[in-house]
């Protein structure tokens, strides 16, 4: 493909320049929001002019874990829940790489929850894109830490009685440098959020509200993909408007945009500075 | 660095061996009795431009090691039994995705939390079969501080050469044993770096069958943009369930170790040529066995010692040669009889194989071994 | 809302007696149309005249149409100005001024307009990419030629240069005052009562600036339109939209069909997306963005052609 397009971020965004075309069509179900999120991610990568050769995508297990394989970059598909830990090693060893973790609600919050809070705390320069479809899709639709209450899943036959995680609040409390959320229907806004995360020097946690139509939507009678992503859009509320007192007409149900940002030092740079001082080098 | 004589603990020798071998990344989690390896690495690595990180748990440590190694940096972690159990899934990933790494497991008493401050040799089978599925493994069992140092260097070399995880198995006694050792002369030290992919990226197949069975590894940033996955994959690196591809991929992983046994296997034979009672021992137990064999010889018993340094893959031919004249084989080990199973498998049809097992958190006493050699010789 | 003063004392001011004067103030929401008309109405009251002020602002949130009729004289009966009878038409938004021109007295009417453009959403109803908004195309020079006495000024920029962009409406009030016969100090005194505390001075300056600008422009008519040429929207080249559909990648999820704003897509007999109505497609890219399978690519051909201005 065109070298200028892929390297300099110049030219129009053509998603095909960033996909492994041999593997297409991808294996996600019809209407799965993960594909929309993938486009937004690649769009952000393009606009920032990130070199594909220096782009490392790390993903775990589940539907989200399979998204990375379609990206024409250095892609790593590791063990369930561990992409953040793997990425921590990769980024510390190779600070020159742009490291992005693509994970899911189960991968990131359940089996990988410990790694998430510590990645937030450590504030290493990694962008974590959590595709939240509220369910374990790959294994057939079991309840996940973000499944809404009363929803039917294959392991909550009478409706989910566990409360759901607010992943963004969790990440913010754990100290993530940048925390954001967006819905797939707002593709350009999602791209902008991912750009903000990629440009941020520190750990950025981005939650993307995705839709699992085939399993979760069908089980709960949530309509088809168009209806599901429209419903997310009607639930969403840009962060900037949350202080406007037009309640109860617009509850702040799904706050989107950059939700938190701090200027804590990036861990890798801090470590390297200390190490250089130990070696008697001046930074 | 020139060769120097130092008094080192086993754990420190492991760390210094890693540094000498070119290890520049360590991720670990505190666990008795291996913590001193992490502590030493946290001091040494920044001095040589490497990175130390204490991760949030055992699993994160091995995952971070795999990440760093994927980035092209020689990497290791250290742990003990419980942590080793937690790391197994990712050791499987390292084997499947062929990511070189070294895992030091300082064995302590088990099961479960067991006896953290007491030695044991209970992870021999865990090292071999701990991770699910058929996968290759290399495990080394040094028996002295000096050997911990040397075998750590060798562990890195093997791991780099064969793109596979290498496990160092030693125990609480050696880890906290202080012995004088000669540090390597860096100029004459033979270090192996994994073979990096070179040439055109267009037709590059990251898991191609090469003559050696070990494909060159693509380094991120070099333009290959490959896929690394724990799913069974074809030569192109992408997942496949095609039976022929699955067979080929799994078989190549096993073959690349099996076909290089000569290089990988390491062992010592003491008085085995005419040995009628052969003692097979490894690690700290081998030191008791060595003394016992010497004593037995003094008593006129034709005893010998076969000491595997590479415990997996087990040096089968060497053992059979050493056992050629044996009437009985004694396997003293600090577990309920793990390696004995392997020895029985190899020699059990011809020779009587007996165990000498301690599961009380105490090292084996040479007198116990001598006693049992005498009993076997008398039969 | 209307202000009526039934029992005003006879005026001592030398205003046009015997005939009702008509002032039409137009603009869009948020600009100060109502404020200006209230100042004028109050001034007339203090001058002992009858005033009827009638306005429409209900439909207008910020940006919507607002107009106000102010009629004053010794005795005023009707609250609204008939077509062709406004003595002064003051427009705070350019296209609004042009739109209300038929109300201006053809022979003697004074037309004062801010060249500021507030393009309303309905002017963008054509959703084609780069479509030109349906907005007044007349230039200030053309309009000033049409009317008996015309002024076009960039009050917004004048106010910014003065130090407070919000004083633009007071500048326009100043220009309007120059078209009437009330004494300056009476204007200033009423204005002073109307403006927020603390802004009296800047409003006084703005008022005087507008008034002097008209007086100067009367002497030097060319100045009137050189303050700022009306911003012309560049005429964009028409683009050709081409939808590239990768049939093999489409999984019939129906997102694009349901969420296309123009409803120009459907699924064919094999349940694969197709462009049913190419003429309706505006190339908005929503289908491309929301296709999880990358099956639709929207190409804008000629979109990089150089811009042509009219």
Image (cartoon, helix red, strand yellow):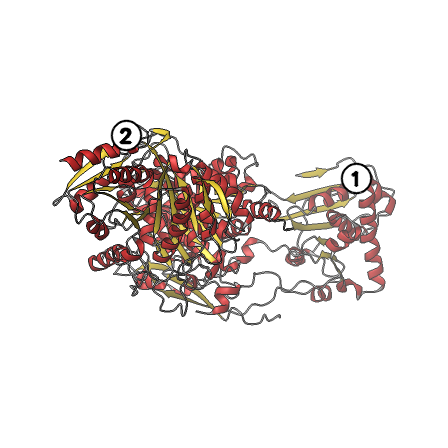
Callout 1: SS: helix
The chain to which mark 1 is attached is C
Query: Height in image: A202 above or below C290?
Result: above
Q: Residue furthest left?
A: B349
Q: Which numbered marker is on residue B359?
A: 2
Q: Which numbered marker is on residue C45?
A: 1
| Neighbour tally class for label 2: few under 14, some 14-19, many 20 plus, Cα within 10 Å | some
The Cα atoms of the two marked residues, 1 and 2, are separated by 110 Å
Q: Nearer the viewer, mark 1 or mark 2?
A: 2
| Neighbour tally class for label 1: few under 14, some 14-19, many 20 plus, Cα within 10 Å | many
Q: Quadrant of residue A161?
A: top left
Q: Quick one: B344 or A34, which is closer to the camera?
A: B344
Q: Quadrant of residue C306?
A: bottom right
Look at 58% across and 68% down and name the residue there.
C235
- Please give left or right for residue C87 compared with residue B120 in the image: right
Callout 2: SS: loop
- Please give left or right for residue C277 compared with residue C12 in the image: left
Query: Height in image: A256 above or below C178?
Result: above
- Percent coordinates x, y for residue A266 in the rendering: 56, 45
- Percent coordinates x, y for residue B2 in the rendering: 52, 53
- Percent coordinates x, y for residue C178 in the rendering: 82, 53
Is the residue under label 2 in contact with that under label 1 (CB below 8 Å)?
Answer: no
The chain to which mark 2 is attached is B
Q: Quick one: A159 or B75, which is closer to the camera?
A: B75
Q: Quick one: A123 or B305, which is closer to the camera?
A: B305
Q: Quadrant of the C terminus of chain B?
A: top left
Are labels 1 and 2 assigned to the same chain? no
- Percent coordinates x, y for residue B276 in the rendering: 18, 43
Specify whether residue C86 is in view: no
Look at 75% across and 37% down and name the residue there.
C5
């Amino acid at each position: 493909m065109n070298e200028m397009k892929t390297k300099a971020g110049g030219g129009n965004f053509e998603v095909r320049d960033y996909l492994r075309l041999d593997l297409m069509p991808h294996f996600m179900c019809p209407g799965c929001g993960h594909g929309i999120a993938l486009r937004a991610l690649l769009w952000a990568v393009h606009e920032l002019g990130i070199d594909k050769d220096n782009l490392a995508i790390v993903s775990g297990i589940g539907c989200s874990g399979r998204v990375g394989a379609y990206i024409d970059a250095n892609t790593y598909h590791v063990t369930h829940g561990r992409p953040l830990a793997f990425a921590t090693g990769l980024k510390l060893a190779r600070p020159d790489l742009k490291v992005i973790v693509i994970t899911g609600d189960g991968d990131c919050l359940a089996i990988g929850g410990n790694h998430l809070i510590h990645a937030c705390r450590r504030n290493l320069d990694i962008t974590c894109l959590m595709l939240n479809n509220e369910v374990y899709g790959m294994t057939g639709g079991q309840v996940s830490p973000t499944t809404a209450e009363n929803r039917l899943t294959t392991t909550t036959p009478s409706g989910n009685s566990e409360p759901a995680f607010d992943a963004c609040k969790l990440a913010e409390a754990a100290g993530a440098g940048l925390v954001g959320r967006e819905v797939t229907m707002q593709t350009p806004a999602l791209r902008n959020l991912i750009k903000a995360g990629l440009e941020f020097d520190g750990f950025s946690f981005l939650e993307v509200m995705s839709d699992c139509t085939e399993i979760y939507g069908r089980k709960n009678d949530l309509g088809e993909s168009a209806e599901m992503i429209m419903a997310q859009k009607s639930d969403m509320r840009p962060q900037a408007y949350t202080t406007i007192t037009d309640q109860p007409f617009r509850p702040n149900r799904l706050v989107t945009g950059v939700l938190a940002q701090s200027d804590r030092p990036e861990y890798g740079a801090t470590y390297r500075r200390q190490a250089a001082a130990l070696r008697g080098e001046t930074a | 660095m020139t060769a120097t004589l130092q008094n080192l603990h086993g754990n420190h020798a492991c760390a210094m061996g890693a540094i000498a071998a070119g290890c520049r990344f360590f991720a670990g989690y505190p666990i008795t009795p291996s913590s001193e390896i992490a502590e030493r690495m946290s001091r040494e690595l920044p001095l040589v431009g490497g990175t130390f990180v204490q991760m949030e748990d055992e699993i994160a440590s091995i995952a971070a090691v795999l990440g760093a190694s994927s980035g092209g940096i020689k990497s290791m972690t250290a742990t003990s039994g419980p942590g080793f159990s937690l790391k197994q899934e990712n050791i499987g990933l390292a084997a499947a995705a062929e990511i070189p790494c070294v895992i030091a497991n300082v064995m302590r008493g088990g099961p479960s939390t067991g006896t953290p401050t007491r030695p044991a040799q209970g992870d021999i089978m865990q090292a071999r079969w701990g991770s699910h599925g058929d996968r290759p493994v290399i495990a080394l069992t040094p028996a002295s501080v000096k050997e911990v140092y040397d075998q750590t260097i060798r562990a890195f070399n093997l791991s780099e050469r064969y793109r596979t995880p290498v496990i160092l198995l030693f125990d609480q006694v050696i880890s906290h044993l202080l012995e004088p050792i000669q540090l390597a002369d860096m100029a004459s030290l033979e270090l192996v770096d994994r073979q990096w992919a070179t040439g055109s990226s267009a037709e590059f197949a990251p898991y191609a069958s090469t003559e050696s069975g070990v494909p060159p590894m693509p380094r991120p940033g070099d333009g290959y943009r490959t896929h690394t996955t724990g799913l069974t994959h074809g030569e192109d690196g992408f997942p496949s369930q095609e039976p022929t591809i699955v067979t080929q991929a799994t078989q190549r992983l096993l073959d690349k170790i099996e076909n290089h046994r000569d290089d990988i296997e390491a062992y010592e034979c003491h008085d085995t040529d005419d040995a009628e009672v052969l003692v097979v021992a490894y690690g700290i137990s081998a030191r008791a066995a060595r003394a016992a064999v010497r004593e037995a010889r003094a008593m006129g018993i034709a005893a010998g010692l076969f000491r595997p340094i590479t415990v997996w893959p087990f040096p089968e031919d060497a053992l059979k040669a050493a056992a050629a004249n044996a009437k009985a084989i004694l396997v003293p080990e600090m577990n309920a009889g793990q390696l004995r199973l392997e020895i029985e498998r190899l020699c059990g049809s011809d020779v009587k194989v007996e165990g000498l097992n301690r599961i009380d958190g105490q090292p084996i006493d040479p007198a116990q071994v001598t006693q049992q050699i005498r009993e076997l010789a008398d039969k | 809302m209307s202000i009526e003063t039934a029992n005003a004392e006879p005026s001592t001011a030398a205003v046009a007696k015997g005939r009702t004067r008509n002032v039409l103030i137009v603009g869009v929401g948020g600009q100060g149309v109502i404020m200006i008309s209230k100042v004028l109405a109050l001034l007339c009251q203090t001058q002992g005249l009858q005033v009827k002020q009638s306005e429409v602002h209900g439909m207008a949130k910020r940006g919507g149409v607002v107009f106000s009729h102010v009629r004053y004289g010794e005795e005023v009966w009707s609250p609204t100005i008939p077509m062709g009878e406004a003595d002064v038409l003051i427009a705070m938004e350019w296209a609004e001024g042009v739109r209300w021109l038929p109300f201006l007295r053809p022979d003697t009417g004074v037309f004062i307009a801010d060249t500021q453009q507030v393009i309303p959403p309905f002017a963008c109803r054509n959703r084609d990419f780069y479509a030109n908004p349906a907005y007044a195309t007349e230039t200030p020079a053309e309009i000033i030629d049409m009317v008996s006495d015309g002024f076009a000024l960039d009050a917004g920029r004048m106010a910014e240069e003065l130090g407070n962009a919000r004083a633009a409406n007071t500048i326009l009030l100043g220009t309007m005052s120059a078209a009437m016969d009330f004494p300056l100090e009476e204007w200033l005194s009423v204005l002073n009562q109307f403006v927020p505390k603390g802004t009296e001075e800047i409003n006084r300056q703005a008022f005087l600036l507008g008034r002097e600008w008209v007086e100067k422009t009367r002497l030097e008519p060319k100045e009137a339109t050189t303050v700022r040429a009306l911003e012309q929207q560049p005429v964009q080249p028409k683009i050709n939209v081409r939808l590239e559909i990768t049939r093999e990648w489409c999984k019939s999820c129906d997102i694009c069909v349901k969420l296309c704003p123009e409803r120009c897509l459907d699924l064919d007999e094999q349940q694969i997306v197709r462009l049913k109505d190419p003429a309706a497609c505006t190339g908005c890219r929503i289908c491309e963005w929301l296709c999880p399978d990358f099956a639709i690519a929207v190409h804008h051909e000629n979109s990089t052609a150089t811009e042509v201005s009219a």
